[in-house]
Amino acid sequence: MKEHPDLPQSLLVLGGTSGIALATARRLIARRTRTVWLAGRPSPSLEQAAQELRALGAEVRTVPFDALDPASHEAVLGKVFAEGAVDMVLLAFGVLGDQARDEREPLDAVRVVQTNFTGAVSAGLISARALQDQAHGSLVVLSSVAGERARRSDFIYGAGKAGLDVFTQGLGDALHGTGVHVMVVRPGFVRTGSTAAREPVPPATTPEAVATAIELGLRRRAETVWVPGGLRMMMTALRLLPRAAYRRLPL
């Protein structure tokens, strides 16, 4: 099998049961990746994901990781980087929440934002510093078009993603010239197990399509990836739409 030198040999996934992350891991293993760390809350699902990736020929280790426990991130991630160079960190954890419930229960809303934003700030900074110390590697962060403009149906989730997106862009600027590549991935609605009960918002996509876009972005050293690509123009138009007109859209 021909290897692709611009793709990672080693991969750390933060959010080890994410459908998008696992699709990406499978794609990268098929091309070059040989070592994978799956970080997430210990569960049968995490172990099953590890077994599936091992069957593809990779050495896979599971790492206990909780986005809501930032005090533990330094020690947990430090152990991974102490085992050897990590060529790519994929920050893929997050929760959708339940907009109607979260509006009624502010503590639930806070938990969504803490998971999607605060936990990512902690893990992202620690990972970025470790990549900078080794003078190479990519930090790929799964954002969302939900963070581009508030929607009535998911503005709490979107608020966390908006913060994550801005944070990642700024981190990329801070690391420019250090040898560390930072890439923001902005998918639209992705059909996964966690979104199965929701009505798809066109244009919907799949974990495999996002994984393909991530691979192409790594090859190009892109800073921003939209999935599907046409979303970039669509979201530009929506951002310019007057608020009164935007409110009338079925979003």
Image (cartoon, rainbow, N blue to C red):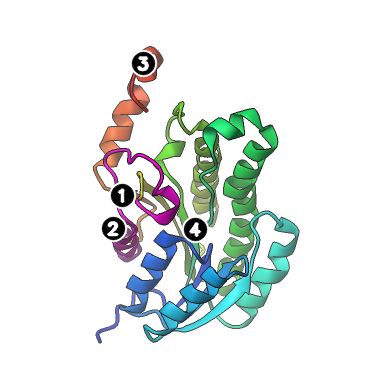
| Cα distance between the residues tagged 2 and 4 | 15 Å
Kindly report the distance in space between the C-alpha atoms of the residues bearing marks 1 and 3.
25 Å
Which one is earlier in the sequence, the residue at label 3 or at label 2?
Answer: 2
Q: Is residue 63 above or below residue 152?
A: below
**Circle 1: residue type:** Val
Query: Disc 2 and disc 1: Cα gap in Å?
Result: 7 Å
- Asked which secondary structure carries label 1, the reply is strand
Question: How many angstroms separate mark 4 from mark 3 (CA)?
Answer: 32 Å
The residue lying furthest to the top in this view is 244
Name the residue that disc number 1 marks: 227
Taking the spot 63% from the left edge, 37% from the top edge, the residue there is 109
Q: Residue at x 34, y 23 (%)?
A: 240
Circles 2 and 1 in contact, beta carbons < 8 Å: yes
- The quadrant of the image that shows the N terminus is bottom left
The residue that label 2 is drawn on is 209
Classify 10 Å Cα crowding around label 1: few (below 14), some (14-19), many (20 and above). many
Q: Which residues are magenta?
A: 191-219
Q: Which residue is mark 3?
A: 242
Inspect the magenta stretch and tell me whether residue 192 lies in it. Answer: yes
Does residue 23 lie above or below 108 as drawn? below
Of the image marks 4 and 3, the number of the one nearer the N terminus = 4
Q: Nearer the viewer, mark 4 or mark 3?
A: 4
Residues under numbered marks 3 and 2 in contact, where contact means CB atoms less than 8 Å apart: no
Amino acid identity at mark 2: Ala
In the picture of the structure, the residue carrying the numbered disc 4 is: 92
Percent position of residue 197, x then y: 41, 45
**Chain-order first, disc 2 or disc 4:** 4
Q: Please state if 121 lies on the left or on the right of 146 as rendered.
A: right
Instruction: Give amino acid for label 4.
Output: Ala
Point 53% across, 62% down: residue: 15
Proximity of marks 2 and 4: CB atoms separated by less than 8 Å:
no
Estimate the x, y position of residue 2 in percent, counting from the top left.
25, 84
